[in-house]
């Protein structure tokens, strides 16, 4: 379908399902095992309703969208989560994601297992230098390999390293296995805080753990000196029945809310509407990641990717206005009723 006919993020999944071949689409869509976490990531946002305020001056709402992430300026508090194999949607692969992110002035985090080589992705940056990218990695092997990879990332010009910590083993992926995509790797990796510090000593770039899923690990990460934490259950692709980022953010808010002041908190999983982003921000999350919708949008290349960013900005501003929020950066937990309700 023509790009102009799509009105929201879920439409891109529909378009991708019709356009991509079955095994490629299934790789993107897949969740672990019974896909409870995949579905919960989407449904959890409906269980908490807004508490809209009225008769508020909201005239400057759009101007309050821009924010900083680790000190870098972006046009909105959301980013493109690291997702492998961008080439499944488009022959240009991740180039569409870099260029779409540049067009929308949002952050993109290229994945280590991208279809394009790291150098090619970074060479496609806007003005070949201005655009800020954070590089995702899996590190579990020997220190030599890790050192080489970190040097490669520094040379490419990434501004931070996103270290995925939620995947000691490959997820159980029945849906993908039925179409013979993905691997049946039975090796487990041994990533510990000790290794984290050895890696940190190799670079001046901040290393951000991605896949924090409890208040205990959030606290531990802060105590270990991280600059930011990234709440995620990998889009429900790793451990089925793992919590959504909204549930983890709520746990942190209830049990150790200072964490939101001590480090920047990123979060992703199941975000499909501007309202979902507002709910995460209201708890103190600094920036929200979106994975699959951008990957699906990449069937249209950079244009599709930029269009998703535009849609999310429009929805965020529109929802914030209807919510009576004067400044998106000032949204607080009082704008949401945190008593969980049944969705239907
Ligand atoms: C991912 N994700 C992911 N995460 C990561 O740390 N390294 C990776 O290589 C990948 N690869 C990957 C591929 C695909 C196709 C998907 C859909 C996801 C997880 C990703 O970073 C993010 O956590 C989720 O995608 C967020 O959930 P939503 O927005 O897709 O619901």
Image (cartoon, rainbow, N blue to C red):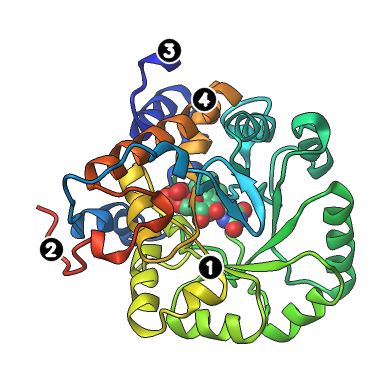
The residue at the point 64 percent across, 33 percent down is 87
Q: Secondary structure at mark 1?
A: strand
| Percent x, y of residue 272 | 36, 43
Mark sitting on residue 211: 1
| Percent x, y of residue 259 | 49, 78
Cα separation, mark 4 vs mark 1, equals 27 Å
The answer to whether the residue labelled 4 contacts the one labelled 3, judged by CB atoms less than 8 Å apart, is: no
Instruction: Specify whether 204 is left or right of 238.
Output: right
Cα separation, mark 1 vs mark 3, equals 36 Å
Disc 1 residue: CB within 8 Å of ligand 1: yes
Residue 271, above or below 116 = below
Number of numbered tags placed on the structure image: 4
Q: Counting other residues with Cα less than 10 Å from the Cα at mark 4, is it few (<14), some (14-19), or many (20 or more)?
A: many
Q: Counting other residues with Cα less than 10 Å from the Cα at mark 1, is it few (<14), some (14-19), or many (20 or more)?
A: many
| Percent x, y of residue 119 | 84, 41
Instruction: Specify whether 281 is left or right of 68.
Output: left
Give the mark toward the camera: 2 or 3: 2
Residue bearing mark 2: 341
First in residue order: circle 1 vs circle 2: 1
Give the mark toward the camera: 1 or 2: 2
- Where on the picture, by quarter, is residue 220? bottom right
Residue 166, above or below 306 = below
First in residue order: circle 4 vs circle 3: 3
The residue at the point 90 percent across, 71 percent down is 144
Residue 75, above or below 282 = above
Could one spot residue 7 in this view of the protein?
yes
Instruction: Specify whether 334 is left or right of 249.
Output: left
Residue bearing mark 4: 304
Cα separation, mark 4 vs mark 3, equals 10 Å
Residue bearing mark 3: 2
Residue 56 versus residue 224: which sits nearer the camera?
56
Residue 150 versus residue 239: which sits nearer the camera?
150
């Amino acid at each position: 379908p023509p790009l102009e006919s799509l009105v929201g993020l879920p439409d891109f999944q529909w378009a991708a399902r019709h356009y991509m071949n079955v095994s490629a689409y299934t790789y993107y869509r897949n969740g672990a095992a019974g896909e409870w976490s995949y579905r919960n990531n989407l449904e959890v946002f409906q269980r908490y309703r807004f508490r809209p305020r009225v008769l508020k001056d909201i005239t400057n709402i759009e101007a309050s969208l821009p924010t900083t992430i680790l000190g870098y300026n972006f046009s909105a508090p959301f980013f493109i989560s690291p997702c492998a194999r961008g080439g499944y949607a488009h022959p240009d692969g991740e180039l569409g994601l870099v260029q779409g992110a540049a067009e929308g002035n949002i952050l993109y985090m290229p994945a280590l297992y991208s279809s394009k080589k790291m150098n090619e992705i970074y060479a496609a940056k806007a003005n070949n230098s201005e655009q800020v990218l954070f590089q995702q990695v899996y590190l579990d092997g020997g220190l030599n390999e890790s050192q080489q990879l970190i040097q490669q990332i520094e040379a490419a010009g990434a501004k931070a390293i996103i270290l995925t910590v939620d995947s000691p083993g490959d997820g159980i992926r029945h849906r993908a296995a039925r179409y013979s995509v993905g691997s049946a790797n039975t090796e487990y990796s041994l990533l510990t805080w000790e290794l984290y510090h050895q890696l940190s000593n190799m670079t001046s770039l901040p290393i951000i753990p991605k896949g924090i899923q409890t208040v205990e690990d959030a606290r531990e990460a802060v105590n270990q000196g991280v600059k930011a934490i990234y709440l995620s259950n990998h889009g429900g692709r790793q451990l089925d029945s793992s919590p959504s980022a909204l549930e983890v953010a709520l746990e942190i808010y209830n049990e150790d809310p200072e964490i939101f002041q001590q480090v920047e908190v990123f979060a992703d999983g199941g975000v499909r509407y501007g309202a979902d982003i507002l709910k995460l921000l209201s708890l103190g999350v600094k920036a929200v990641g979106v994975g699959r919708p951008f990957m699906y949008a990449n069937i249209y290349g950079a244009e599709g990717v930029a269009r998703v960013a535009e849609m999310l900005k429009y929805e965020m501003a529109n929802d914030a206005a209807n919510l009576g929020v004067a400044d998106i950066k000032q949204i607080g937990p009082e704008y949401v009723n945190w008593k969980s309700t049944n969705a239907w």
